[in-house]
Amino acid sequence: MKNILYLGNKLSTHGNTPTGIEVLGPLLESEGYSLRYASSKKSKVARLFEMIVATYRFGRKSDLVLIDTYSTLNFWYAFLCSRLCVWFGVKYITILHGGNLPHRLRKSPGLCRKLFGNAFLSVAPSPYLFKIFADEGFKVAYIPNPIDVSDFPYTRRFQLRPKLLWVRSLARIYNPMMALEVLKLVQEKYPDAELCMVGPDKNKILPKLRQFASFHRLNVKFTGRLSKREWALLSEDYDIFLNTSKVDNAPFSLLEATSLGLFILSNNVGGIPHIFTDQKTALLTTPGNAKAMATAVLQLLENKELQGVLQAGRSSLLEQYQWQQIRKKWLQVIDELR
């Protein structure tokens, strides 16, 4: 089996953060598989149209269709293309993204039964989604998101500074305002504390963030979207990585930050506690509680022993997410199709 059609949001060229299709696809190509992709169209309507056309034109010529599956509008991309796969008798795998998929299961049980029930397999990148989908009776496998550590070289932090980094799209679901609230509290003790926020303005909330930062005289920088290489280089000047998401699954950015040697502070939501262990590989705090996260920042800055523990847990954590480990699971899944 060699030919794979991969459907997902291939949008990094438009300023969006690279997603699964742009990470897993090239890795499968490196294993000798021939892949076609859809879609890189910026317009949501054009993207859906291209995915449907690609499924119609190439679905029957493909041995397998991979479908990146999300919980909101992009859910419909996956659903409609899966209907064509069923019609053509083509096997497809849904790759589960987004910590809000459990809500979609509750909101649209009939549609989910058609989408996931007819899939050859659903792949969950976190134990969190694996358990939820398994409990619903769907055929599901746990395969973590891969990370190429060579793209995110390690820098050891010997003397921690109150320099905070945040990397996601500026979207409400990722709660960027909370990062500013954390900085405001940290600055009360460390006036030189600073925050850099990397990511495109997805929900047009940047003006509100700038207004808040200006009013409270916060030392914050907004870079817009950066390439992987650009933000990896930028990270060398920062020490602590904040994740303020309201829901989450298995975000690439946290694993990338871990590879870079940044200390991870995150809301304890979704799949995060299935990846990171509080006080061992990260500091996990009460969701939406800026005061709790700010307190964790201060604790980390002032506790050398804790810094050592978190650094020591980094290597064993990252080993699980390297392609050399994950490739075996993907090749086994694909072999089952033969």
Image (cartoon, rainbow, N blue to C red):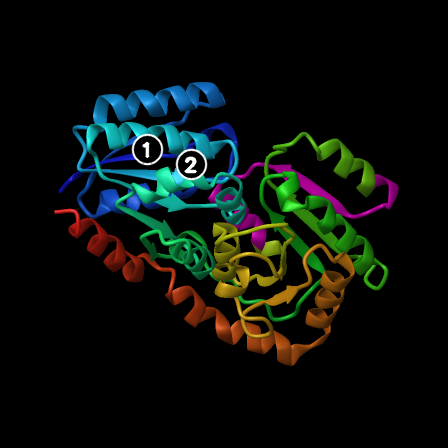
Residue name at image x 84 percent, y 64 percent: 189
- Of circles 2 and 1, the one toward us is 2
Cα–Cα gap, marks 2 and 1: 11 Å
Q: Which residue is mark 2?
A: 111
Q: Determine which quarter of the picture holds residue 125.
A: bottom left
Instruction: Indicate left or right for 335 with 87 as reference.
Output: left
Question: Does residue 218 belong to the magenta stretch?
Answer: yes
Residue 209, x across and y down, in percent:
75, 38
**Front-lying residue, 85 or 273:** 85
Range of residues picked out in magenta: 214-235
| Residue type indicated by callout 2 | Leu
Q: Quick one: label 2, few (<14), some, or many (20+) residues within 10 Å?
A: some
Q: Determine which quarter of the picture holds residue 295.
A: bottom right
Considering every residue shown, the one lying at the far front of the view is 110
**Front-lying residue, 255 or 172:** 172
In the image, residue 55 sits, relative to residue 177, either above or below, namely above
Residue 251, x across and y down, in percent:
50, 51
In the image, residue 97 sits, relative to residue 295, either above or below, namely above
Q: Quadrant of the N terminus?
A: top left
- Residues tagged 2 and 1 counted as in contact (Cβ below 8 A): no
Q: Which residue is mark 1?
A: 82
